[in-house]
Image: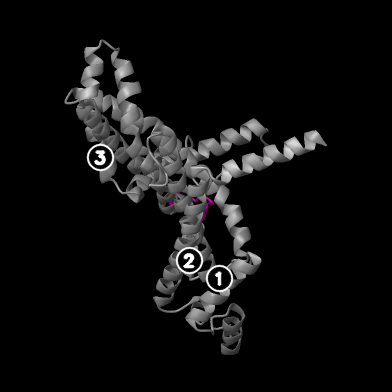
């Protein structure tokens, strides 16, 4: 009896500590703000999409084998005969009550099932691109700052400017040409080989990873170039501060001055950028996915936009907005971890 009472008191104390915790309160507040943001974003996206001429059923009128009566049946079946506010309200109500994002016009399947099929492929590509970008850009940015105005710095600046000057679709096009010249070294098209099922579990991982090389490079080039420049600029600003000169005057090793004192204070703006990087990668993924036939969410969204598959487009936009909010929340929490002086409630 006594042990049960102690357990209840311990659980109550833990719950009270959690509720009054600054981080917990901040996360709850951000989730509530995100819900309101999602509502506004989806409403704005829906009405902008409806402003474009025609809809999915209008494209079927070009098929002479489909009668006008059948066209009207489809309009009623998809709810396209209702007014815009009614369509948006019914779609939103189904989400809130049933968790149902509707049925895809083109695929005649649940939109949610289509998203769950495609999201893992896009997440895999985006996370790989994010990891490669940061693993290469941060060290190069540090090296450029340390070697300021030297040959190394100038070479890295040329690489950075060149990377930012090439749009993603141009980079993807060059990589496709490179893949054709070096064929069959780099596979293009799809996520796996034809005989993927015959491989061992390790062979399957290698197969997917090999197919990811070119799409990941195409998705990472622009982000890498920008992040390298920002890292260089932020670290140079910090290295000019008085406390860095004081640390050097005390005889601290240069590596300790750079990686412990300077980089720790230069990292905050980079963490802030991280929140936008995740959503930006999802937004730019459709280019890499389209060029390399990668079966991801970006390619699916592009096809849905072209076919005016409105429920699939809306669900994809909601997913992008959710990822943007999650990315910003993670960045804010990482800022708190990196710099304890930051107060989330402010």
Chain-order first, disc 2 or disc 1: 2
Residue 92 numbered mark, or none: 1
Label 3 sits on residue: 162
Q: Do the residues labelled 2 and 3 touch (CB within 8 Å)?
A: no
Q: Relative to 124, is 174 on the left or the right?
A: left
| Residue 4: x %, y % from top left | 79, 37
Q: Residues within 10 Å of mark 1 (few under 14, many from 20)?
A: some
Q: Does the magenta stretch include residue 295?
A: yes
- Mark 3–mark 1 Cα distance, whole angstroms, equals 45 Å
| Residue 78: x %, y % from top left | 59, 78
Label 2 sits on residue: 39
Say which residue appears at 21% left-offset and 13% top-offset: 249
| Residue 127: x %, y % from top left | 49, 41
Chain-order first, disc 3 or disc 1: 1
Specify whether residue 145 is in view.
yes
Say which residue appears at 37% left-offset and 42% top-offset: 272
Q: Are marks 3 and 1 in contact (CB under 8 Å)?
A: no
Q: Give the range drawn in magenta.
A: 291-298
Specify whether residue 102 is in view.
no
């Amino acid at each position: 009896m006594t042990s049960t009472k102690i357990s209840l008191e311990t659980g109550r104390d833990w719950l009270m500590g959690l509720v009054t915790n600054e981080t917990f309160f901040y996360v709850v507040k951000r989730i509530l703000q995100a819900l309101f943001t999602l509502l506004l974003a989806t409403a704005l996206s829906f009405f902008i999409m409806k402003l474009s001429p025609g809809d999915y059923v209008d494209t079927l009128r070009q098929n002479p084998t489909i009668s006008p009566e059948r066209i009207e049946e489809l309009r009623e079946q998809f709810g396209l005969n209702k007014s815009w506010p009614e369509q948006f309200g019914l779609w939103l109500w189904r989400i809130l009550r049933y968790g149902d994002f509707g049925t895809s016009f083109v695929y005649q399947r649940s939109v949610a099932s289509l998203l769950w099929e495609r999201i893992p492929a896009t997440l895999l590509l985006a996370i790989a691109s994010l990891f490669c970008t940061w693993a290469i850009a941060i060290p190069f940015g540090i090296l450029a700052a340390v070697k300021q105005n030297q040959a190394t710095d100038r070479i890295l600046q040329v690489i950075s400017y060149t990377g930012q000057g090439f749009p993603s679709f141009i980079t993807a096009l060059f990589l496709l040409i490179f893949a054709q010249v070096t064929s069959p070294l780099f596979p293009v098209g799809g996520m796996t080989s034809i005989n993927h099922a015959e491989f061992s579990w390790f062979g399957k991982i290698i197969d997917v990873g090999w197919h990811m090389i070119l799409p990941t490079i195409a998705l990472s080039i622009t982000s890498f170039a920008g992040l390298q420049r920002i890292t260089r600029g932020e670290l140079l600003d910090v290295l000019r501060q008085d406390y860095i000169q004081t640390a050097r005057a005390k005889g601290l090793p240069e590596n300790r001055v750079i990686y412990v004192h300077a980089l720790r204070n230069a990292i905050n703006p980079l963490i802030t950028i991280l929140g936008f990087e995740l959503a930006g990668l999802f937004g730019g993924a459709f280019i890499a996915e389209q060029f390399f036939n990668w079966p991801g969410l970006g390619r699916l969204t592009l096809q849905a936009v072209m076919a005016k598959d409105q429920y699939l487009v809306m669900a994809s936009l909601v997913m992008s907005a959710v990822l943007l909010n999650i990315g910003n929340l993670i960045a804010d929490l990482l800022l708190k971890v990196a710099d304890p002086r930051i107060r989330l409630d402010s």
